[in-house]
Image: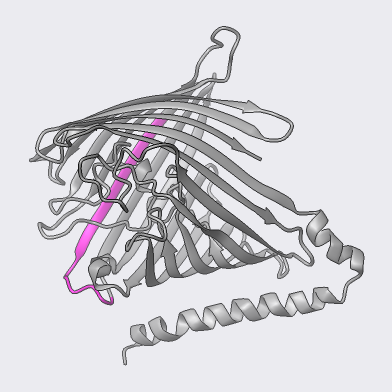
Amino acid sequence: MSNECRFNRWAPLGASRIAAALVLSVAVSAAGHAADDLEGLLEDGKPILDVRYRLESVDQAGRVRDATAHTARVRAGYETGRINGIGGAFDVEWVETIGDRKFNDTVNVDARYPVVADPDDLALNQLYLIADGTIPKTRFKLGRQRVIWDNARFIGNVGFRQNEQTFDAGRISTTLLPDSTLEYLYMEKVHRIFGRDSAAGRLDLAGHGLRAQYRGFDGWRLTPFALLLDYDRAAVAANSTATYGLWVTGKRKFGDGLTGFLGVGVSNQKDRGNNAGSVDLWYYHLEPALGYRDWRFIAGFEQLNGDGATGFRTPLATLHKFNGITDQFLATPAGGLRDLYAKVKTTLPAIGGVGGIKFGAAYHRFTDDDGSVDFGDEWNAGISKAFPTSYGRWIVGLQYADYGADTFAADIDKLWVTVGFKL
């Protein structure tokens, strides 16, 4: 048996047992504390409530009917206080269609309509134990949990959709080294946005994540990482990959309200575990930006290479954040993908006495990875406004996006109206 196979078989079991033993040992110690300390576990906790209504309208060329989806999401639970840094949390998520289901929710597979990937669901979203600072400058988290790495390009929670993505995972991070964070993550199951009634809603895997971040350079962060995935199911075995990468982000103030920003990413991906293919692909990302007072101007270049048989894969990402918000490139084409884009963000001046309105717009031009095949382009724009109260925050948003196809997918435009409340 190879060293890698031994690691795949025993490391996750050992990591979970070690984390569980540490949590249990401190919990047993805490049980001997005074009753008022135990009461503090509840009294110092806080309820979790996140409610969101959304209208999503989709007009897609080639579909018999337009999609109109009225959906509501309620996420409710509780996070405890801490005893010796030990605590926990849970929340349940309920997604429900309001009125007639005039869309393809990916479970009903109604091909007359475009896809709106918000199927009805009622499920446990998170349930975890946490030990934070029990060992100095170290955090353990064990159970079903939300995981977001950096900009969510490789691991994210897909927070835009009504049913978020969570993981059955064990996670340990430490800041013991100066100006640094070191993290190990083990994932054994991903609960995806498609819900419990979908065959693609839950996927078993053996996933290892190693991530470090160094902040010792003034204004700059260096984040090397490794993401090693191996899926059990043959239908998704092509996602079994080993990805090694580096993010570099930084900013510099020039005075008079002017700030420069830069983000750079590079990664290599190879086949691993149950993947029957031969993969050796690269990913590149360059994003310079300029901020002036309330404005930010962003230019970007993102490339996911392809070899003619498969493209660079990021199956655990928050894909809606990348390559346009009409979601035409959730899977990288076999010939790769190059995305040249420009964005602008600002807070608008008060309109009719109402201030704090956020505005953003973007334009994307898509080709294959060497620029020889034009896929299409997208433009999008949106506004949002937050209304804080003494109990929580209301958020209202409006977005529109239009994708014009050249050689990839079909013309599509989407409209979203969102109203949400969060404690």
Compared across the picture, whether 122 is left or right of 390 comes to left
The image quadrant that residue 42 belongs to is bottom right
- Residue in the foreground of this view, choosing between 405 and 336: 405
Residue 64 forms part of the magenta stretch: no
The percent coordinates of residue 187 (x first, y second) are: 45, 69
Residue 280 forms part of the magenta stretch: yes
The image quadrant that residue 170 belongs to is bottom right
* Residue under the point 40% across and 85% down: 9
- Residue in the foreground of this view, choosing between 416 and 167: 416
**Colour basis:** one colour
Q: Can you say which quadrant of the picture contains the C terminus? A: top right
| One can see residue 139 in this view | no
What is the residue that sits farthest to the top in this orientation? 352
The percent coordinates of residue 125 (x first, y second) are: 53, 57
Compared across the picture, whether 413 is left or right of 395 comes to left
Query: The magenta stretch spans which residues?
Result: 273-289
Where 54 falls versus 173 (above or below)?
above
